[in-house]
Image: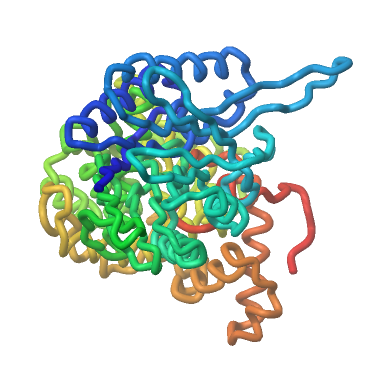
Amino acid sequence: MTLKICIAQLNFLVGDTAGNAQKIIAAAKSAYAQGARLVLTPELSICGYPAEDLLLRPAFMSACDDAVKAVARELAGLKGLHVVVGHPMGGDVRTKSVAVQRRFNAASIVSDGRVLETYSKRELPNYQVFDERRYFTPGQGTCVFPVEGVSVGLVICEDAWFEEPGLLAKEAGAEILVVPNASPFHVGKTGERVARMSERAKALDIPVLYAHMVGGQDEIVFDGASFSVAADGTLATRAPSFQEDLHLVSAERVNGRVVVSGPSAHDRGAEAELWDALVLGVRDYVTKNGFPGVLLGLSGGIDSALVLAIAVDALGRDKVRAVMMPSPYTADISWIDARDMAARLGVRYDEISITPEFEAFRQSLAKEFAGLAEDTTEENIQARIRGVFLMALSNKFGSIVLTTGNKSEMATGYCTLYGDMAGGFAVIKDVLKTTVFKLARWRNVHDPYGTGISPIPERIITRPPSAELRPGQVDQDSLPPYEILDAILERYMEDDEGIEKIIAAGYERKVVERVARLIRINEYKRRQAPPGIRVTHRSFGKDWRYPITGKFSA
């Protein structure tokens, strides 16, 4: 006996219930033609994840119900096929004018034109980007169903990270555990998932199949990389990451036990995964929101160079436009390197000087600023002129502006409101400056999307970073060295270490206290920043909910 199982690793669009249903139907038909009799779709595949407050709308919940029925109806003729469909279920019940939540994160087994059984998620995550307790009620009970002689246990995502849900399924007779998931990517998460599912498989002494979503949704990215682990915890199969795939797994009974086997995709390494996450995040944000292309300010510096390379890999050169906007302080090498990079990638490149506008601002404000030395005010005026130019081009041609600021700048406020922060999507908002350099070097050696080797001129990588808003300016005039700054940010912002603990680890008190203060006083800026791609376990987005007005800084 061999049961073929298809993990339908698919990219869904939040709210497109009819389109998502058709994607599931097409995948199920294709898998059936290849011999699969059990098809697993990711968590909440009917509505996409996360649907957020759409789940509070009765009309949305009704549309999800209709989509599940459509899947059942259109697959009715495929004899013996079982499809696990993720969907929300229920709604609010009003009692004496008070709404009582009875909404569930569910998965239904669809076969022979009907829903055979439905399981509701028991463990609802409420940390990092997850907010499921806002929307769902914990489920109860177990779900074990037969497919071609194999007893299949079903739990959903977070359930598999806890002991009880899987144990209850095993006690109910499950010989294999299947787990639909929507688990956002961050660096290191893939290995963590495999390790935890390996523990679960060993504890239950049955194989575990992890069916994962792929695609970008606002600030989060799902990396796919679905997999199965054997009863002894060893990795048995793995789907490719960051792409749709119908991953076929064979479940065979050997000596009375179910054994799984199938293909395993190659592990491409940490930098490749991070690059793929940024590329997919850009591609899906732009395409799913209907923008015809992107544009960005290309300064001749490392950040905008990296964003340009990511954008071309994501969208192709024809949908990317770079604009160089020199000021009186722009070095000649910045022009030369920006032109060189644009030529290497073959994108449209334009130069628009901001000097006339900058001088006009100076003249208009001369009376107000009389007797006062030039400072960050004049620097910010230059950045804001550039922001106005980019937004004007965006309005006229419809392309979305990609901002180019990194996480180190976002943390410390080394960025200008309505200037370099002006735009629609912040590509490297969650990438520390030291990682920016690592990615640039990695991309110059690798060409994962066939857009050209070495897209970033070497001098852009090796020259000292500078905003070029005053003569001779470099970033380290205003910030600690990035190696020190980023190490403190990882400890303080990402890992919640206190100031005294960081100092005890060997960092200078004055520097640590300064960095902590910069993070605290620049919260008002971050609240006004565009969304950006989350690639760490804590980003300046849903992971970070600090008050703007506050004094605590330990």
* Residue at 60%, 63% in the rendered image: 493
Residue at image coords 63%, 59%:
519
Q: Is 460 rendered above or below residue 122? A: below
Q: How is the image coloured?
A: rainbow
Kindly tell me whether residue 296 is visible in this rendering.
no
Q: Is residue 58 above or below residue 310?
A: above
| Residue 36 visible in the displayed image | yes
> Left of 495 or right of it: where is 399?
left
Q: For this rendering, which residue is in front, 462 or 69?
A: 69
Query: Residue visible at 58% across and 34% down?
Result: 105
Residue 93 percent location from the top left of the image: 75, 19
Q: Position of residue 264 (x, y in %)?
A: 23, 58
Q: Could you tell whether 174 is left or right of 223 in the image? A: right
Residue closest to the eye, 499 or 35: 35
Question: Which picture quadrant has residue 465?
Answer: bottom left
Q: Residue 318: x percent and y percent?
A: 16, 32
Q: Is residue 526 left or right of residue 20?
A: right
**Quadrant location of the C terminus?**
bottom right
Quarter residue 375 falls in: bottom right
Farthest right residue in view? 96
How many marks the image carries: the answer is 0
Which residue is more in the foreground, 245 or 454? 245
Q: Quadrant of residue 386?
A: top left
- In front: 175, or 304? 175
Query: Which residue occupies the extreme front position in the image?
Result: 256
Question: At which x and y percent is residue 433?
Answer: 41, 63
Residue at x-position 46% and y-position 74%:
481
